[in-house]
Image (cartoon, grey):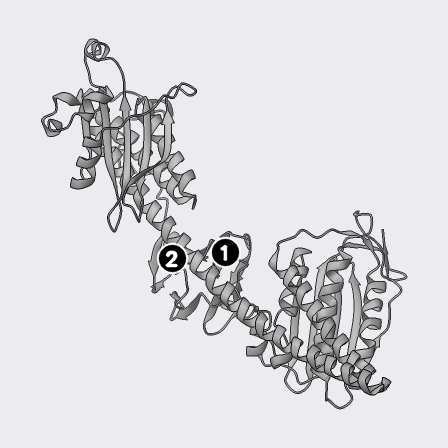
Amino acid sequence: MPSLFVIQGRNRGTRYDLTSHEGAMSIGREAGNFVQLDDNEVSRRHAEVRRVGDSFVVGDLKSSNGTWLNSRKIERAELASGDQIQVGRTILVYSRDGEDVPAVNQVDIVPAANAGEGSRIVRTARDAEGGDQLPDDTQNRWLARARSNLQVMYRTSLAVSHTLDIDELLGRILHLVFEWIEADRGCIMLLDPESKQLRTKARRDRRMGQATSMAISRTILDYVLDRGEGVITSDAQDDDRFSGGHSVVRTGVREAICVPMQGRYGTVGVIYVDTTVPLGDAIEGGQRQFTDEHLKLLIAIGHQAALAVEDTTYYSAMVQSERLAAVGQTIATLSHHIKNILQGIRGGSYLVDMGLENEDLAVVRKGWDIVNRNQNKISSLVMDMLSFSKEREPDPVPSDLVALVADIVETVQQRAAEIGATIAWNPPDDIPQLLFDPEALSRAILNVVTNALDAVEDRPNAAVTIQVVCDTVAQRVSVTVNDNGEGMTPETIAEIFNLFVSTKGARGTGLGLTVSRKILREHGGDIRVTSVPGEGSTFVLEFPLRTGDGGQTVSDPENNITRP
């Protein structure tokens, strides 16, 4: 059946059945997508796949980083089995099982015929003969060179496609060049975008540990940059092209290759290699160290490297731009929430001052309650910011999940009483000691319970139900929080886990659910949401079942108890 398989990225190994969904199947970072990817380089709604007749078509949804099909950027394209779709750093493969069955069924093995009929075997060869010399030495040498050149270009393509670090990329390029060319020294220089001066970014010496000062001819560099041509020089002082310059003679270089790194939009730098073999040794050897073939292939390598440098530079600039935009949005949103909290504190402080002045203890207490509530709000906001802003591994310790939830219920009981809501919580007695990070998980559950209370405020018969279930068959633990609030539409559910998206208006920060899901995912779990408009919502916080000693669980079916 038609499917998408994730073969690279954090969701690697996940399979999506394209026949299980009607209409457009979106691919993106947010929870409402058919293919939800945990990849921060993927847009919220990045691309989509649609059925068109008997085929499937992939289309980009004006994403930030674009959608790529088989290494080619596309807006819309029909999929063929085996096609690779890249979004961000995630690669998915499209597979359409069984589409070649009719053709396969048309292959037949015919029975043996009379001796005078059919095909005739004219020559045989064993596997070992595949590497034998071809009878034509000239052709054999040509094939060997072509194969060698193809291998160099293939390895260069791999090098430039597996890193976004320019320094690492240039180091790899020089390493490959030295494997192929018998050069003594080499370097890669890039043009500074502002000063337009060459800056050395990578250098390599054949004899490691014996590197000396490397003087490069300005005459050669200027020629390569001005004309965009690669040059090969042998005893360069005799080369008429450089007769006007004396720097070649001063360097004492016997042979050198210098090629431009020509990208899509211009020259980004040069690759330079040379050898300092004494002229007498070169003459005795009877041949030059560098050949025209070396020059041509180095030009091709320079072009590949230039494209990679341009792509990496563009990508870095784009990431920086997105980072600055995100910082600006964060500052604006947090400033708005902090301003509201400060206004609350200011109002409470005014009542405290007025009560003190009139010696009215009731007014003082009322003002202090307002200050205290807003103090808790800003404390919660800061903790959510810290939880969201840094990646952290959970610190699991043997803990009592039931006791943790009971503490949360006690914490929010006063808030429930203020809004006239009831909290239904029946602590189960069959939950063993579990292994999790109590501080982090407490914060995740508290955020969800607090949201449930906010959802039922001003609702008749407001109620919140909390359940803890340990499923030994599925090896999962779940905390379910149900409310009878206004509920949410599917469109709202798709947005609630996005940063700074809140259904509470000015009262919410849009951080709580984002942080809660992050904590559950750090534990290897997630949050599931179901909701019916007008009836309420249910949040299920799930994570893997691990007992307090970190070992396997033992099930007692008779008493429905799971214990270490």
How many marks do you count on the picture?
2
Residue 166 visible to an observer of this rendering: yes
Residue 23, percent from left and from top: 46, 74
Mark with earlier residue (1, 2): 1
Residue that badge 2 annotates: 68
User: Viewer-nearest of labels 1 and 2?
Assistant: 2
Q: Give the class, few, some or many, for how many residues have Cα within 10 Å of label 2's Cα (few <14, many ≥20).
A: many
Identify the residue at image location x=39%, y=52%: 104
Q: Is residue 523 above or below residue 334?
A: above
Which label number is shown at residue 5?
A: 1
SS for dot 2: strand
Amino acid of disc 2: Trp
**Front in this rendered view, residue 62 or 145:** 62
Residue 260, percent from left and from top: 24, 39
Real-space CA distance between mark 1 and mark 2, rounded to the nearest whole angstrom: 15 Å
Residue 541, percent from left and from top: 71, 66
